[in-house]
Amino acid sequence: MEQPAAADGQPQLIEMDHSIGYNGKYPDTVKFHPTMENTLVYNIGGLLVIENLQDKHKQEFLRGHDMEISAIAVSNSGNMIATGQKGTVFQRTTDAPIILWSMTTRKPMAVLRGVQDQVLKLQFSPDDKFLACIGQNSTFIIWKVQDGQPIHTRVSEMPMSLLKWGELDTSVNPKHPTYTLVTGNASQVTINRLEFDISSMQYFVESANC
């Protein structure tokens, strides 16, 4: 079938108008937007889809991944979306980058690296200042959202399957609160405390097994 021609005689590119489908292969890839009513965020392969449930034609497709998206997180404010993918087959190493999207511009804010094989889970801290990730290569990383810099990286003996932020503690330092982050695998649950060190002006992580 020939493509329709534009006014100048050149063939027009066909743009996708609407898509139906979700395979449910990755359990952490469907999210309701916390502030936009009737808005669903999910993936179709390597595409990030933002869809209005009341109007099937109100779909947006964000492109940036070269493999299937395997994890999605939406910030609590609704201003950011993080998407992680399976490890790429187009490079020597199976890098699995994470894209941090602006909900306002629908464009990438940063590409976060350090995970290989597959991103399993992503979650923003309650105040949206940090993004935590666990990967299939037993990697646990926390990035500072403002500049995309990793503040903590750890490789465990076993792949983790649990990732959950707790409430903030502002009793000691309201400007730099203490964070609690729970991680775990098939046999162990770990409580991680993200605390600010005034002497170095940096956050550090202390971990203790339950």
Image (cartoon, helix red, strand yellow):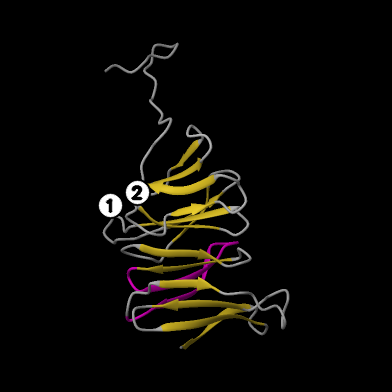
Horizontal and vertical percent for residue 39?
54, 45
Say left or right for 95 vs 131: left
Residue 158 falls within the magenta-colored stretch: no
Count of numbered tags: 2
Residue 66, numbered circle: 2
Q: Residues within 10 Å of mark 1 (few under 14, many from 20)?
A: few
**Which residue is drawn at the image coordinates 53% and 37% (left, top)?**
54
Q: Which residue is mark 1?
A: 90
Q: Residue at x 50, y 41 (%)?
A: 51
Quadrant location of residue 5?
A: top left
First reached walking from the N terminus: tag 2 or tag 1: 2
Q: Indicate whether 90 appears above or below 158.
A: above
Residue 123: image x %, image y %?
A: 50, 65
Q: Which residues are magenta?
A: 136-157
Compared to residue 192, the image places residue 100 above or below, namely above
Q: Is residue 92 left or right of residue 76?
A: left
| Residues marked 2 and 1 touching at CB (< 8 Å) | yes
Q: Secondary structure at mark 2?
A: loop
